[in-house]
């Protein structure tokens, strides 16, 4: 088998949607599993849709994702340039060759003439009018005009496009790795423009030429390109490259959480989750779209989540490192059906990765948030806080939001807990417990728990009579990690002080 070479070829027309990231990821996993190479190619032939900053955003986002390219506009390589606008001189000779070989033709039709043709076809009862073998004979093109008139128009500088000459009633077959045999009759295809009047190729010609010249062995791309695949097969044939044609694999859509349609930015905005890997700021409107990175997601969790949107390993294993994904990945285990996006599952993945991290690593991340909020704390203290909170957190920022009481005494006390659990005798019990704890010489979690339970037993009290009150004194909250661990970490002096303050404020 020749070397596996795949490419991810985004257009800089906006931020990179997670569907695009998944395409890049599957290309990466496939290439690395096969010992091959992955190329990043920027397809910027559609200058009308170019968005300032989008190219840089794509490169930075993929870098954050850990998807490393062997060849790109950044890394270089032997098959560059890797940006289509820098390759534009390459495409016209191939388009002209197709015209010369009678597989394509020049078309001079104006926008008004194209519109008039479509209106005529609709009036004749054709629901989806196309520029094809039926209509091309009535249009302004080199198939309908004389050679002299064509030359005269070109010499006069008239604008024109080059269209593929689609054969009539021919079946185009494509054996897709994911979908099996795809068969399309050319009567259902139109004469697509392959070279535009602005001197640039359309996606169809450019991607075929580039894939051939870059020796791409497999084209792994989104399902939305499946209708164009038969045209690409024809271009390979017409250009004499059929023996070098890559294998195709068209990935399933990522669907909305309810499964009803393709996931979009609007769905994320409405339901409160990111659809971009990193934050995007629209250069025109300055609108900010949230990203997984800035929302606190661990990059490994993000990649793990994405990998399961369409692929499964065939086992019950769900947590994979990038190397684990590379080792397990195969296109044969990618499904045909669309994959529903499950935001709760995404959060679950992040929880698993957070829990697997060492307290030292978590403390480093939490220290950044603490400093941003003007809090200074010893590393050892923060590490213990992380150890106590990580089973309850989804993000590192949750440890700050839900664990502020570790770093400063509560100023407010949970009203529901006070209303339900702070009874007439509660201040007496809290005061007596405070005195017992003050006498402890070893303020360990175990000793605090022993003393607490001993006090309950001596006074014939249930755990629910005093534990919620003790917790609200120390944390201001009605629930949380082991209260005895919290008290031990705060230390005897701070614990006693907080109990005294609570007795004053709550009463």
Image (spheres, helix red, strand yellow):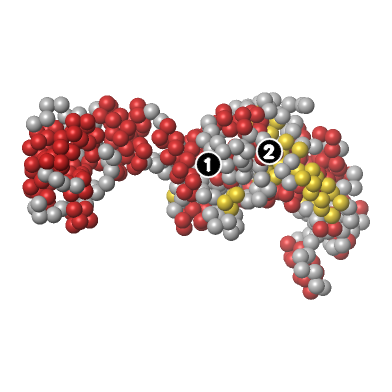
Q: Between residue 277 and residue 435, name the one nearer to us.
A: 435
At 50% from the left and 40% from the top, the residue drawn is 302
Q: Dot 2: what SS?
A: helix
At 62% from the left and 45% from the top, the residue drawn is 310
Cα gap from disc 2 to disc 1, whole angstroms:
17 Å
At 32% from the left and 37% from the top, the residue drawn is 389
Q: Relative to 135, is 148 above or below?
A: above
Inspect this view and state whether residue 321 appears: yes
- Per the rendering, the mark at residue 467 is none
Find residue 78 and report its image quarter.
top right
Q: Quadrant of the N terminus?
A: top right
Q: Position of residue 402 (x, y in %)?
A: 29, 44
Q: Between residue 497 and residue 425, name the one nearer to us.
A: 425
- Per the rendering, the mark at residue 305 is 1
In the image, is 493 to the left or to the right of 96?
left
The residue identified by callout 2 is 331
Q: Does label 2 or label 1 sit earlier along the sequence? A: 1
Q: Residues within 10 Å of mark 2 (few under 14, many from 20)?
A: some
């Amino acid at each position: 088998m020749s070397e596996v070479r795949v490419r991810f070829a985004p257009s800089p027309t906006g931020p990179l949607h997670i569907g695009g990231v998944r395409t890049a990821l599957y290309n990466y996993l496939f290439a690395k599993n096969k010992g091959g190479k992955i190329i990043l190619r920027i397809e910027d032939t559609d200058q009308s849709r170019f968005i300032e900053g989008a190219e840089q955003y794509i490169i930075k986002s993929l870098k954050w994702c850990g998807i490393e390219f062997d060849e790109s506009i950044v890394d270089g390589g032997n098959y560059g340039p890797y940006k289509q606008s820098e390759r534009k001189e390459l495409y016209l000779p191939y388009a002209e060759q197709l015209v010369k070989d009678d597989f394509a033709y020049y078309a001079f039709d104006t926008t008004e003439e194209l519109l008039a043709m479509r209106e005529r076809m609709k009036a004749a009862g054709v629901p989806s009018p196309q520029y094809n073998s039926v209509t091309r004979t009535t249009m302004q093109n080199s198939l309908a005009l004389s050679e002299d008139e064509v030359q005269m128009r070109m010499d006069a500088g008239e604008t024109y496009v080059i269209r593929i000459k689609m054969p009539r009633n021919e079946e185009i077959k494509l054996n897709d790795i994911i979908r099996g045999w795809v068969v399309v009759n050319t009567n259902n295809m139109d004469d697509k423009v392959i070279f535009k009047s602005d001197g640039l190729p359309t996606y169809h010609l450019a991607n075929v030429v580039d894939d051939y010249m870059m020796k791409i062995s497999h084209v792994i791309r989104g399902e939305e390109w499946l209708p164009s695949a038969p045209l690409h097969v024809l271009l390979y044939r017409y250009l004499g490259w059929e023996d070098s044609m890559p294998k195709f694999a068209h990935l399933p859509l990522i669907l909305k959480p309810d499964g009803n349609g393709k996931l979009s930015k609007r769905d994320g905005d409405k339901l409160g989750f990111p659809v971009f890997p990193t934050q995007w700021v629209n250069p025109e409107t300055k609108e900010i779209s949230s990203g997984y990175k800035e929302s606190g997601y661990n990059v490994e969790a993000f990649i793990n989540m994405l990998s399961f949107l369409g692929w499964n390993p065939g086992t019950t294993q769900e947590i994979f490192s990038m190397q684990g994904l590379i080792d397990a990945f195969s296109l044969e285990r990618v499904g045909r059906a669309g994959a529903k996006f499950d935001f709760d599952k995404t959060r679950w993945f992040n929880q698993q990765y957070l829990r697997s991290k060492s307290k030292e690593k978590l403390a480093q991340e939490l220290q950044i948030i603490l400093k941003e909020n003007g809090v200074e704390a010893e590393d050892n203290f923060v590490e213990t806080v992380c150890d106590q909170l990580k089973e309850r957190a989804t993000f590192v920022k949750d440890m700050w939001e839900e664990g502020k009481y570790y770093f400063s005494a509560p100023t407010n006390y949970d009203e529901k807990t006070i209303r339900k659990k702070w009874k007439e005798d509660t201040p007496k019990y809290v005061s007596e417990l405070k005195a017992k704890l003050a006498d402890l010489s070893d303020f360990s979690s175990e000793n605090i728990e022993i003393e607490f339970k001993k006090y309950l037993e001596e006074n014939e009290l249930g755990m629910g009579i005093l534990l919620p009150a003790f917790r609200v004194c120390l944390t201001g909250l009605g629930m949380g990690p082991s209260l005895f661990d919290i008290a031990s970490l705060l230390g005897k002096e701070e614990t006693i002080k907080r109990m005294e303050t609570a007795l004053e404020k709550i009463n």
